[in-house]
Amino acid sequence: MSTTCMFITHNGHAFPLADCPVLPIESFRQAVVDAVAAGGRLSALFAYPAGLGQLRLLAAIARTEQGDIAALTANLGEQYLAITPDCPQAHLYEREIFEQWNVLPLGHPWLKPVRFPKPETCGRPDFFSMTGEEVHEVAVGPVHAGIIEPGHFRFQCHGETVYHLEISLGYQHRGIERAMVGGPTPRTIHYAETIAGDSTAAHAAAYCRAVEALGQARVPARAQALRGVTLELERVANHIGDLGALAGDVGFLPTMSYCGGIRGDVLNMTALLCGNRFGRGMVRPGGVAFDVDARIVEQLQQWLDSTKRDARSAIELLWNTPSVMARFDGVGIVPADQCEQLGLVGVAARACGVARDVRENFPYAIYRFAHIPVSTWHSGDVFARAYVRWLEVRRSLAFIAEQLDALPEGCTTESVSEIAANHAVVTLIEGWRGEICHVAITGDGGRFAAYKVVDPSFHNWFGLAMALRSQQVSDFPLCNKSFNLSYCGHDL
Amino acid sequence: MTMLASIVHVMCALLLAPALPGVITRVKAWFAGRRGPPLLQAYYDLWKLLHKGAVYSKTTTWVFVAGPIVGLACAMTALLIVPMGGTAGVLSFSGDFLLLAYLLGLMRFFTILAALDTGSSFEGMGASREAFYSALAEPALLLGLVAMTAQSHSLSISGMVAAVTPVAIASPAGPALLLVAAALLIVFLAENARIPVDDPNTHLELTMIHEVMVLDHSGPDFAMIQYAATLKLWVLGALLVGILVPVRSGWWGVDLGAGIGGMVALAAVVGVIESTIARLRLVRVPQFLVAASVLSILALVLVMR
């Protein structure tokens, strides 16, 4: 076990790049495999140009037991021995590295494109296919019937049973990571906010914490509390929207309609904070851009009470309706061991009984002072993913009420000083979908030389594919909704 | 006079059938705390579709074009057979219930062929589901009608339904008639692609049964499909209302009015069903349909006893 060659850092602590030893690629590979086998999780693995034409590989491994992050680096040549065969969590990262930098991970099982950065290959990977009597292939998307993002799903079916689902994304690739390089500029925060529109506050907070760590800014307590409120409002709004959408997918109207309305109320609470229903413009480097006064707090508290009441009656109706439970129970199961292997995060992981929550495991900002208990359920099915959402809604609402009752006094923003040159920082945030990881690396001038974003969807899409094995093809929309992953967060 | 009443019923059905989905939608909207679209939305939709052009895929043949036409023809012919309460069908003869069942079968057969003709994987999947589920719904319908035949000693649907009087319902055959009504309600929901068998509101192709088979139809063809669907709703609904609204006053205007009122009430009941229960998993649908057959058989046993 090569713990000595790993550099240990913490969530949102900046460190000089020179402190992180550059390993030979073989020991890097072994160290990653060992750390993951010991219970770590690959939060990020990517290559970046380290100057003089040298490519460097960086792995950030979140170690739940120790509550810290192990950072490893190694120089890359034209090829290296793939990590994936010994550590399945790395499979998508290595495909990404191959696609972005043309470095060949030798022995990788399937180097399919991740995002099609070159237009001529767009949408044309070679798909897995099955042959035989009564076997048929169903292709869905990238243009869908509803108002959702583009993604292509290919099912290998035998009658109504799905044997294999292949998900091909990349239609929303905008080059966000490339645009972040050279920052921070006044524009960078806006890129961060648009990584995934439904996680605006979470991605903005991840970015801001990176900048604050590099610029040694101490965010005022009042701003931390308001950020917490914004983040939890985002979680509540999305979870309630998802529960309504789940009800809609099984054709259960009452919960669907009321949840749509309640979600709107929660979004309006965010709008009351900052003037935007999705929290744009709220979280800014150094603090928050909007303060609240007593009138707003009182209004928020009133809305919180009515939301709690409305949400309870609308959502508990789901658990009390047998026809709904018959659809949720035992559908789309992801076993806990598969969840560990794939490194699922967020609601999808907690619904497998894995107590994985950045707020608890790697506490940051306000969550160091106000704990939110981790909500888990053991069954790993659609019901578990729905029920965990409801548990989290209740706990988040309680957290928001608690914060509003005792908002610290003081200012809401602190200026960020000069960004440290040749430093790196790994920030983890529990967005509503799960762990959001941002890694910022600065160059000589205190500008981003590389910026890596890992949205929870990047980890979890494969979980959806696994959940569909041996399921009815007609249950796919329900399973899909129970994960509700982001396309643009994956495609960046 | 009775022929006049029958013709008036057919006219009413042709005019009023598209209002039934409107009633269902309004009831659902009320449950959801919404206002919902206008009652006459289906008429506006038909009008709009009739003024559009149709798009035909190059892979389709005449079968694709014939699907909606045969479907509408079958639905209209079925409407001529079906009675409304005491009002006999225009074309009423001994054994007409078999023709009714197989007119609906022919309609389905052509819809399935037209779906398969497109070569789309979605439509093939929908066609396969429709074929499977209707094969299970058909025995329930036929056995239910046979039970009614046994009760009324009549081989025409008009005779069977006319025999359902308040007296008959109060007699020992009453429970059998209610069982037939329950079986017919299941068939009615399944054949008309309603919850809990199918979800007419969903946009998710993978979960659809009926909707997914008509995805490629457009313009006037789609208008014909939509109109035929409302007529089918009327035909099967009329059978159900014939049992559940046994108003046999002897004045044809009153009987017909009660029947049409029953249709509106039935649409409202469908709205309530759709608002209060979720859809079944597709693998559970066969059990639901077999349950309808079991109810029909039980009714038959009760009548024959």
Image (cartoon, helix red, strand yellow):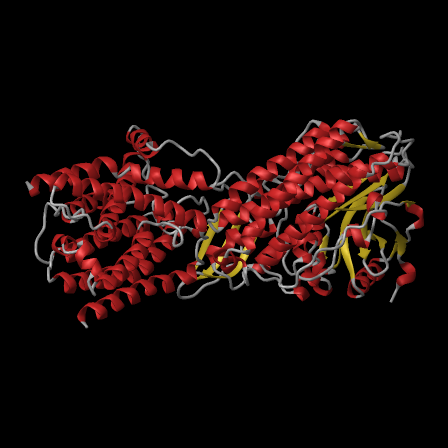
How many labels, in total?
A: 0
Q: Quadrant of residue B160?
A: bottom left
Which residue is at 25% across, 41% downward?
B261
Please say whether residue A354 is visible from this viewpoint: yes
Please say whether residue A149 is visible from this viewpoint: no
Residue B56 on image: x %, y %: 31, 38
User: Which quadrant is the C terminus of chain B positioned in?
Assistant: bottom left
Residue B132 on image: x %, y %: 33, 60
Which residue is at 90% across, 45% downward?
A17
Of the pair A432 and B84, the residue shown nearer to us = B84
Residue A232 on image: x %, y %: 72, 42
- In this rendering, would A1 be left or right of B255? right
Q: Quadrant of residue B183?
A: bottom left
- In this rendering, would A96 be left or right of A419? left
User: Which quadrant is the N terminus of chain B positioned in?
Assistant: top left
- In this rendering, would A22 be left or right of B107? right
Which residue is at 14% across, 37% downward?
B8
Of the pair A371 and A206, the residue shown nearer to us = A371
Q: Residue furthest bottom?
A: B305
Of the pair A208 and A124, the residue shown nearer to us = A208
- In this rendering, would A261 be left or right of A15? left
Q: Residue furthest left?
A: B1
Residue A164 on image: x %, y %: 53, 60
